[in-house]
Amino acid sequence: MGNGHVRTSDTVDKHATFCRPERDRRVPRGEMLSAFVYGCYVRHGKASHVKAPARRGDATGSTYDMPPRLLVPFVFILGIAIAVISTLVSRYIDVDSTEQELHHGRSVFVPLTSEGILDVYDDHMLTISQSNTQLGKVQCTAASTAEALTSLHLALDMKLSGKQEKAIKLFQHAVALAPCHPDVLNYYGEFLEHTQNNVIKANEFYVRALTYKPNHEGALINSQRTARVVEEHDRIMLRRIDDKRNTLSNIPDNNAALIRAKKEAYFQHIYHTVGIEGNTMNLAQTRAIVETRIAVSGKSIDEHNEIIGLDAAMKYINATLVNRVGSISIKDILEIHRRVLGHVDPVEGGQFRRTQVYVGGHIPPGPDSIHYLMEEFVLWLNSEQAIRMHPVRYAALAHYKLVHIHPFTDGNGRTSRLLMNMILMQAGYPPVIIHKQHRHKYYEYLQLANAGDVRPFVRFIAECTEQTLDLFLWATSEFSRQVPALSQETLFTEKHNTIILEDDNNEILEND
């Protein structure tokens, strides 16, 4: 009996100690019911068998006594009541929100959940939306193709009738409507070859037709027939450019006219390079910013910083990279870009992009491929195969490859043109000036290169190189006419001034 009494008192003390925090602790509202039921269970289910012998004469304990058989039904009924009330409340909230949406006639904006989970549209609805968009695109393409073929037939009739002006307009309309249709491209190429005597342009259209349909019989025959003519034309043009470069290199560096021409070309290069990207500064304003660093009223800060950044990048190239043939690294390209964009965006300057960008119809590689592609590009840039190319072709391909990768968020075109000019200067050519008024031709040839034919872009760079050499030769020739202003429409016209070098007395003649 004595030992049993000690165990009973120990049990009572344990339960008293365990239950005391339940009475003192403040329980959250959601845990009140479970704490209350558990406390009742402890007091009446277990503790009653221990308390009964010890507190038999205590009157206050009778108020908490409840038969154990009534506890389970009480908890069950209470749970059912809570579930019914919760259901009714939730239905009321749903009905009220639905009525509000119908009343206002629009969906209510739902913020993100605390878990950060985004709801997406139903897959079936997404499929319907995409299919409708694709169907509309197909219908639009079919309608454009039908109109293009109609215009093509009319152009062929005008060609047979001898109405060349109407025929060329109809051909151009057909190409604009269906630029990927091989028949349209092939017939237009034949028209240019036979009636306009433009074999170079005709071959471009033949190659474009084969790009979209490699087994096109007519385009294949025409392309093979004109390929030799085009190759010979390109060889003659590059040989003529080399002769002009050699003539320019024979002029002493201390020649006053050459110094003035270099200074003028420096400002021209900055003016046209930033102008291609949309800068609205004129040549005089560009010169003033480079020379004085004084701001021009009415122009944005970014336009000032674009000019200052390009000036810094050109000075960096002239001081460090011009004499390093075959050892260009990724760090060098990043340093060029850091100076190009550093004044406009110091955060992105000299850093590869970390997001996807979109350039017109061209979607560059994703940011996760930039480092690998740039390593491959630098390996090609320093390879013997690339260095042994003609410098103009080598520089043009380097420009295209870098701008195709598009490794930066902004400043890709300026960096690519600077890299191209660095390669040309290493080979003894002056920096090429791409006229800002020919930016549409410039982008058009880049798009043709993306389609698979890079020759038109290389030819365009070669023409720009020859025009720049003409600028220097005109400026350094005695009794020459006024230096051609590149801010005027003087480039790539039907008949533009060029320079012919005579082999006998090495005189410079102007061909009108």
Image (cartoon, rainbow, N blue to C red):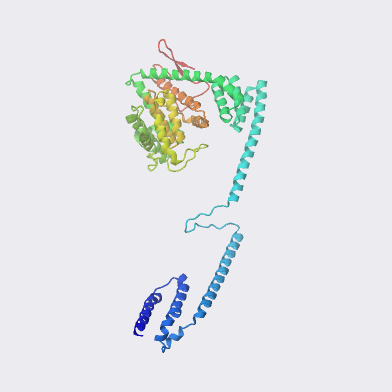
User: Viewer-proximal residue, 217 or 275?
Assistant: 217
What is the x, y in percent for residue 356? Answer: 47, 42
Q: Quadrant of the N terminus?
A: bottom left
- Res. 391 in view: yes
Q: Name the spot of residue 421 as percent of width and height, x first.
A: 40, 28
Looking at the picture, how far across and down is residue 303, in whole percent?
Answer: 42, 38
In terms of depth relative to the viewer, which is nearer, 509 or 124? 124
Residue that lies at the very extreme toward the bottom in this rendered image: 57
Instruction: Pick whichever, 22 or 348, lies toward us.
Output: 22
As drawn, 208 above or below 300: above
**Relative vertical location of residue 9 with respect to residue 293 in this rendering, above or below:** below
Task: Please state the horizontal and vertical placement of residue 48, each as a whole percent of the image.
Answer: 44, 82
Pick the front one: 467 or 226: 226
| Identity of the residue furthest to the top in this view | 504
Q: Is residue 417 left or right of residue 183?
A: left
Identify the residue shown where x is 46% and y is 24%: 462
Q: Give the left or right position of residue 252, taking residue 79 as reference.
A: left
Quarter-wise, where is residue 333 in the image?
top left
